[in-house]
Image (spheres, coloured by chain):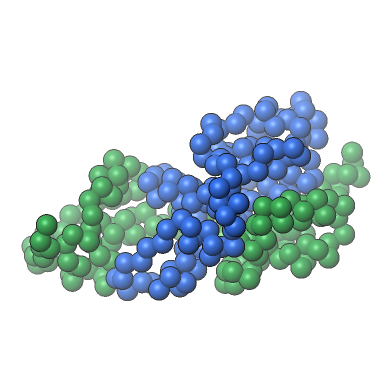
Amino acid sequence: VPPTKYDNSVYIEHHNYDGAGYLVRKAREENPYVNLKMAAIDYRYWSVFHFKFYETVLNIKMKLIKMKWIDFTHLEDAKAPEKKEVLDLVDKYKMRNIMSSSMTGTLRSWHNFMQLSFMKTQKRQFTG
Amino acid sequence: MTEGVHYKIDFTTFARLFGFSKKGRDAEVIHFEQHMNTSMISSTYEYEDLANGSTTALKSVYYVLNNMFRETIYPKGGSDSTSLRRFAPNLLARILPRARPFSVSRFIWFNLIEVTESDNCNLPYAPYIMYMIEMVR
């Protein structure tokens, strides 16, 4: 199929893709790279679908999950009875690399969260 | 951002990038299973009667591991942090003693596919995707 160029000055569909699963699936079935990149929209996007999907789905704060990383140094130093079993299981599946900060250094640390978890588990042991 | 450049990556490269071996890649896939009920993983709970789908009654080890999964390989959105949803019980079942090993890389890969095809899921793995983009370009 020869590449066709959009007439950018004429018409841009405005869809709200939030909650519109059928429209998303239908749009994803098409290969956007058959057409040339649209010049009338933000340079980061290839097509109107990409642009509107970002605007109406991805750019909504609640839709993006904030990822965290695990501070294994802190975990190894923690005085928790279950830490060896936890670390053994993490190493068994070689998940330490992907969970730790070595790969994704810009993530928020799970350090404080980890402290809370162990406090909770230790407390539970005391209370039975 | 990619500034309009189209990047692509295959599964093997993806798994290698994140440090998973061939053995890990070829292990069983959790997404081919049905969603497990928490009553099927009652041994992960302090008391089996408390296996009600909540994380609060999990044994310490599984509680901590579930929290770690929830922040990394199986991130969860929303405000309810105390429920085991979708494949979370399956994950816990796979880390029980004597459980068959599963493929972590395929788990993330299939989860990515599932999320990209659904408009209802919250969108995870942004740093991992950014890392992939930076590595393959």
B36 versus A91 height, above or below: above
Quarter where residue B57 is shown:
top right
Q: Quadrant of the C terminus of chain B?
A: bottom left
Quarter where residue A83 is shown:
bottom right
Q: Which chain is green?
A: A
Say which colour chain B has. Answer: blue
Q: Nearer the viewer, residue B26 or A45?
A: B26
Q: Is residue B28 toward the left or the right of residue A30 in the image?
A: right
Q: Is residue B52 visible?
A: no
Counting from the top left corner in percent of width and height, residue B63 is at: 73, 45
Counting from the top left corner in percent of width and height, residue B101 is at: 65, 43
Q: Is residue B32 visible?
A: yes
Q: Nearer the viewer, residue B70 or B6?
A: B6
Q: Nearer the viewer, residue A46 or B20?
A: B20
Q: In the orientation shown, which residue stands out farthest toward the front? A: B22
Q: Residue at x 83, y 65 (%)?
A: A77
Counting from the top left corner in percent of width and height, residue A47 is at: 23, 61
B10 versus B103 height, above or below: below
